């Protein structure tokens, strides 16, 4: 479903330049790229603390171990 919004000529020019720089075909794709850049991806680095590999893998099971 498409929606029309009003923007100033200045913003239109900026979006046009960004569209060309990003190499996309629509303003919608420009806005999507801007949204993606504004929300950094959450890193899982360090979520396990300082556990060693043996401790992390202790409670994991293979397919053969499952019921």
Image (cartoon, rainbow, N blue to C red):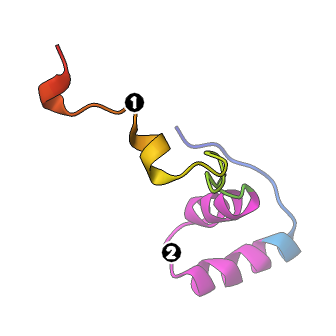
Q: Secondary structure at mark 2?
A: loop
| Rendered position, 32 above or below 65 | below
Q: Residue extending furthest top?
A: 67
The answer to whether residue 40 is above or below residue 48 is below
Q: Residue at x 83, y 71 (%)?
A: 11
- In magenta stretch: residue 29: yes
Residue 33 image offset from top left, x and y in percent? 62, 64
Q: Secondary structure at mark 1?
A: loop
Q: Residue at x 48, y 42 (%)?
A: 55
User: In the image shown, does 41 or 8 lie closer to the viewer?
Assistant: 41
60 or 45, which is in the foreground?
A: 60
Numbered label attached to residue 16:
none
Left or right: 65 in relation to 39: left
Q: Residue at x 72, y 55 (%)?
A: 39
Residue 42 percent across, percent down from the top left: 66, 52
From the image, tell me which residue sits under label 1.
Answer: 59
Q: Residue at x 72, y 73 (%)?
A: 15
The residue identified by callout 2 is: 24
Q: Are marks 1 and 2 in contact (CB under 8 Å)?
A: no
User: What secondary structure prevails in the magenta region?
Assistant: helix
Q: Where is the C terminus found, in terms of image quarters?
A: top left
Q: Decide: is 36 above or below 4.
A: below
Is 48 displayed left or right of 56 in the figure? Answer: right
Residue range (magenta) = 12-38
- Please state the horizontal and vertical placement of residue 31, each as a whole percent of the image: 66, 60
Between 67 and 20, which is closer to the camera in this rendering?
A: 67
At label 2, counting other C-alpha atoms closer than 10 Å, the crowd grade (few under 14, some 14-19, many 20 or more) is few
Estimate the spatial distance between the alpha carbons at disc 1 and disc 2, rounded to whole Å.
Answer: 46 Å
Of all residues, the one furthest to the left in this rendering is 64
x, y percentage for residue 22? 58, 80
């Amino acid at each position: 479903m498409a929606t029309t919004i009003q923007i100033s000529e200045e913003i239109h020019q900026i979006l046009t330049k960004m569209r060309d720089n990003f190499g996309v075909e629509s303003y919608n794709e420009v806005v999507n790229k801007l949204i993606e850049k504004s929300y950094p991806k959450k890193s899982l680095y360090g979520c396990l603390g300082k556990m060693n590999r043996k401790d992390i893998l202790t409670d994991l099971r293979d397919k053969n171990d499952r019921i």
